[in-house]
Image (spheres, rainbow, N blue to C red):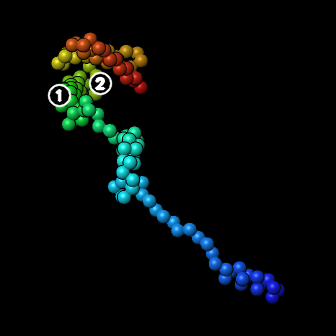
Amino acid sequence: MKLLICLLITLASSPLFAQDLKYKPINPAFGGDTFNYNWLLSQAQAQNDFAEDPNANLFGSDPLADFQNDLNRQILSQLSRALVGDLFDADGRLNEGIFEIGSYQIEIINGIDGVSIGILDILTGSTTTVTVPTF
């Protein structure tokens, strides 16, 4: 037991050898090698997900297209208000017929499976049909 204690004390008191740690920065802005600049810049640009589109304008989109979309939304909103106000009778049922509002032709037909509403854009010729089932 004494021998083991003496051995531990001898090992604990022996000099330890270590190496100094040296930090050398990579980034030239923080004291690193100036030859690393081009490599670091190319790596940063390759990882950049927020690169600016050279064709993008200041507003992010076309202001005239935004104006046209807003105008279309307002027209369709007025159209829906007019439909709700004019097309329903006093009992809340939809009146049948063909209605023209602006450049839209709306055809309403009460059928067996429900109310069929057809919307035709006269300018483009595109059509949309919505069938609302009745209970």
Q: Is residue 78 left or right of residue 1?
A: left
Percent of width and height locating residue 57: 21, 33
Query: Could you say which quadrant of the image residue 45 lies in?
Result: top left
Question: Which disc number belongs to residue 64?
Answer: 1
Q: Is residue 1 left or right of residue 89?
A: right
- Tag 1: amino acid: Leu
64 or 41, which is in the foreground? 41
Amino acid type at image mark 2:
Arg
Q: Secondary structure at mark 1?
A: helix
Looking at the image, can residue 89 be seen? no
Q: From the top left corner, tell me how far across and down residue 14 is, in percent.
A: 67, 80
Against 65, residue 97 (above or below) is above
Residue under the point 39% across and 53% down = 33
Spot occupied by residue 22 in the image (x, y as percentages of width and height):
48, 64
Whether the residues at callouts 1 and 2 have beta carbons within 8 Å, the answer is: no
Front-lying residue, 29 or 130: 29
Q: Nearer the viewer, residue 99 or 33?
A: 33
Measure the C-alpha gap from mark 1 to mark 2. Answer: 40 Å
In the foreground, 106 or 92 = 106
User: Residue 93 bears which disc, if any?
Assistant: 2
For the point 39% across and 48% down, which residue is it? 36
If the image is split into quadrants, where does the N terminus sit?
Answer: bottom right
Answer with mark 1 or mark 2, whichever residue precedes in sequence.
Answer: 1
Across and down, in percent, residue 9 comes to: 71, 84
Point out the frontmost of discs 1 and 2: 1
Residue 113 figure quarter: top left
- Report the number of numbered marks: 2
- Secondary structure, mark 2, is loop
In the figure, residue 3 lies in which quadrant?
bottom right
